[in-house]
Image (cartoon, grey):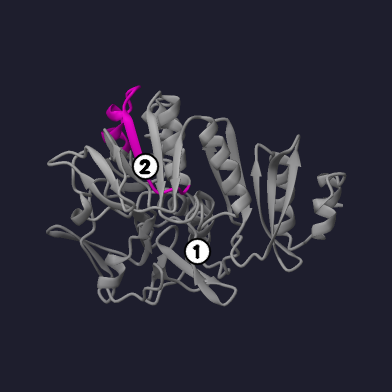
Amino acid sequence: MRHVVIIGAGQAGAACAVKLRALKFDGEITLIGDEPSPPYQRPPLSKAYLLGDIEQERLWLRSADFWSEHRVNLRLDQPVLAIDTGARRVRFGDADLAYDELVLATGAVPRRLPAAVGGNLEGVFTVRTLSDVDRMRAEFVAGRRLVIIGGGYIGLEAAAVGRKLGLSVTVVEIAPRILQRVAASETADYFRRLHRGNDVQILEGTGVDRLLGETRVLAVKLRDGRELPADFVIAGIGITPCDALASAAGIMIEDGIRTNARGRTSAENVWAAGDCASFPLDGRQVRLESVGNAIDQAELVAANITGAEKDYVPRPWFWSDQFDCKLQIAGLNSGYDRTVVRAGQGVPTSIWYYASDRLLAVDAMNDPKAFMVGKRLIETGRTVDPDILADMATDLKSLMR
């Protein structure tokens, strides 16, 4: 009988607690969250929830009764202030809590525009939490002008919602193209056409000089001198791992909280999982920002707490919904040197990433078959000759035989 304390009541923290009980762990579990809401899904926040298509309760990962029924002590709206790894205690305000095993699932926070450029003005938002979206929903009124800073997936999803609700939307990307960091130019081209076809203005290769306004944002001034009138602004410029609590406790940090292949940190009896954690992969520490990774990594940590002693083998997959397109991504495209494009009726439906002749990843747009075949090939370590894949006469299902 031991006490497992999990800091962070998001996808990873919740998955760890649920898995511990599924593995018949009979000790005490305390799941601590700094938000007032019970564990919930984040991906729908910038899509269905922002659109108003689903109610808040449908975001909950488990029913309201689940946590008490499974003897998980859920402590919400209680930020942890410090960790004492020597005494094995975590501190809240004037109280503290002892642990035998500690799991850090503290997630990540969005990067914010600096106050020096107007990031502290009213009407400037980020998209990460329920409260973030609840604050901005009233801004989405038909005819208003929305400027989105950042042409990554979060920014493009928010742009699609804005247009669906009748707003005038402009996306500003400082890199030469949208999705510069995460996708090939062919994927970027596909989504640029999709957004422009839905009257989203996309400005690439230009940064923001500052936001204009006394107390509330009124316009965005670009570095090239242009000014974009704005009723409100969304910053989608990436996230940073929440590792300050671990760092202050003397736990090793390397692009987030550094773990070994089994999820252990540099501190005894302390583990980490999810967006906050980096782990070894192909000779370097990597950090994956996805629901699938958060669940898989957290479940592995739960298994290792109960004695499994297993290494983490990631199975990366991601998705994004924009207008009528569902993008599904399998694998990691880092280090690719070639892409193969498969198209239907002249429109690309999947982009396959290779390093030499080794298949790394696939982006599939409204093409679930390409996603499933690519995912299976990547997970089993198989590859396909790029020239065979490029031949549109090749039946994707045949590649699995």
In the image, taking residue 226 as reference, residue 259 lies left or right, namely: right
Gap in angstroms between the C-alphas marked 1 and 2? 45 Å
Q: What element carries label 2?
A: strand
Eyeballing the image, is 251 above or below 398? below
Mark number displayed over residue 148: 2
Q: Which quarter of the picture shows residue 364?
A: top right
In the image, taking residue 271 as reference, residue 398 lies left or right, namely: right
Quadrant containing the N terminus is bottom left
Q: Residue at x 38, y 42 (%)?
A: 67
Mark number displayed over residue 37: none
Q: Which of marks 1 and 2 is nearer the N terminus?
A: 2
In the image, taking residue 179 as reference, residue 211 lies left or right, namely: left
Position of residue 294 measured from the top left corner of the image (x, y, whole percent):
48, 54
**Residue type indicated by callout 1:** Thr
Residue 233 is covered by the magenta coloring: no
In the image, taking residue 321 as reference, residue 250 lies left or right, namely: left
Task: Please tell me how crowded label 1 is: few (under 14), some (14-19), or many (20+) other residues with Cα within 10 Å.
Answer: few
Question: Would residue 243 be seen by someone viewing this image from the given angle?
Answer: yes
The magenta segment: 133-152
Q: What element carries label 1?
A: loop
Q: Mark 1 points at which residue?
A: 306
Marks 1,2: beta carbons within 8 A? no
